[in-house]
Amino acid sequence: MSKKSENEKAELVADLQRTRADFENYRKQIEIQKENERKAVKLATVMKFLPLVDDLDRAIATYSELEPLRKSLEKSLKDLGLAKIPSEVGTEFNPDLFEAVMTEGEGETQVVAETLRPGYYYEGEVLRPAMVKVVGK
């Protein structure tokens, strides 16, 4: 083989390697985009689903015969990556987790007096803060 042929061959091999690398990068970018789109669709679905969850939660709290549904609801929420933000009475107020819509009393520390609407974590991050009544102690 001549020197010119060897150089052409080396250039073609280098072009092929670059093309393969470009294609592999493109494939990875497409996979990342698809995954991000799936996550966005799931999040949008969960957001639309929250009012129904609130209604079911209120119905279960009001009608004791619906109590067996609570475990099923909690399992479904967990499967979706949702978890309730703990907001029991006496929980110290945290503005990252709670939205105070009513306050009473003055005090050095503020605690939750009542949960008006539950808040949720979605895959470990706050999706919707809990709407609470706060009292100062």
Image (spheres, helix red, strand yellow):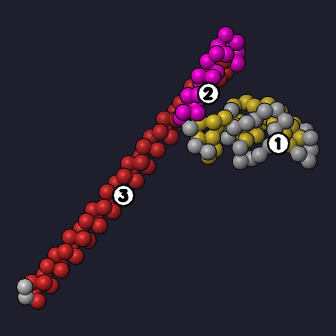
Q: Which residue lies furthest to the left in this view?
A: 1
User: Is residue 59 visible from the viewing direction of this image?
Assistant: no
Q: Which residue lies furthest to the bottom in this view?
A: 3
Residue 8 picture quarter: bottom left
Q: Nearer the viewer, residue 127 or 11?
A: 11
Going by the numbered disc 1, the residue's amino acid type is Glu
128 relative to 93 in the view: left or right:
left
Q: Residue 74 carries which label?
A: 2
Q: Which of marks 1 and 2 is nearer the N terminus?
A: 2
Residue 17, given in percent of the width and then of the height, sits at: 24, 71
Secondary-structure class at tag 3: helix
Residue 85, given in percent of the width and then of the height, sits at: 69, 38
Residue 75 picture quarter: top right
Q: Relative to 75, is 137 above or below?
A: below
Q: Quadrant of the C terminus?
A: top right
Secondary-structure class at tag 1: loop
20 relative to 34 in the view: left or right:
left
Figure disc tally: 3
Going by the numbered disc 2, the residue's amino acid type is Glu
Residue 109, given in percent of the width and then of the height, sits at: 88, 45
Residue drawn at the location 59% of the way across and 24% of the way down:
73
* Label 1 close to label 2 by CB (< 8 Å): no
Q: Quadrant of the N terminus?
A: bottom left
| Residue 69 painted magenta | yes
Secondary-structure class at tag 2: helix
Which segment is the magenta one? 61-80
Q: Which of marks 1 and 3 is in front?
A: 3
* Label 1 close to label 3 by CB (< 8 Å): no
Residue 136 picture quarter: top right
Q: How crowded is mark 3: few (under 14 residues within 10 Å), some or many (20 or more)?
A: few
Q: Name the residue under label 3.
A: 29
Q: Which mark is residue 92?
A: 1
